[in-house]
Image (cartoon, grey):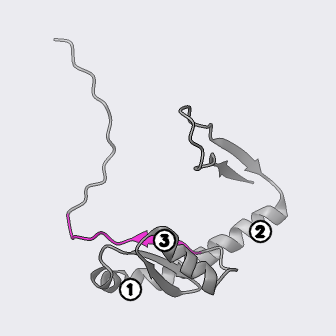
Amino acid sequence: MAARIVLPDTQQTTAKPAPVRMEVVTDPVELEKARAQRQRFEKNWAWFAPRLRGLGEQHAGKCLCVARQELFVGDTPQEALALARAAHPDDDGLFTYLIPREKAVRIYAHQRLLAPVPG
């Protein structure tokens, strides 16, 4: 059994956000397809991860896409994805990675609202 999150259509232009739907998947065929896709992603990531430092210096400000352990570079995610899909239309384990234009310290922390303490 696995969960699948179904996101709303991003082309929607209404003021009210569309709901996100979560489904439980129990079909063995669907589960096997998901496992196979995950394996293709992990293979692409395993190829990409050790090369990241060098790629970051070489492609600052660009979007990278990896499909079938091959790198595709574009100015936008759409451009990089289009190049990758044209070369490897059957690889559904591809992913994109944005290289920042400038080196900077990035802090990823949970942001939460704090309420004033009554005093």
Q: Alpha-carbon distance for marks 1 and 3? A: 14 Å
Q: Residue at x 75, y 54 (%)?
A: 1
Q: Residue furthest left?
A: 119
Label 3: element kind: strand
Return the residue at label 3: 96
Report which quarter residue 12 is drawn in: top right
Q: Is residue 71 left or right of residue 112?
A: right
| Magenta residue check for 99 | yes
Q: Residue at x 52, y 88 (%)?
A: 70
Q: Position of residue 51 (x, y in %)?
A: 38, 86
Return the residue at label 1: 51
Marks 1,3: beta carbons within 8 A: no
Quarter of the image with the C terminus is: top left
Q: Position of residue 34 (x, y in %)?
A: 71, 66
Label 2: element kind: helix
The residue closer to the viewer here, 102 or 23, is: 102
Q: Which residues are magenta?
A: 94-104
Return the residue at label 2: 32
Q: Alpha-carbon distance for marks 3 and 2? A: 24 Å
The residue closer to the viewer here, 72 or 3, is: 72
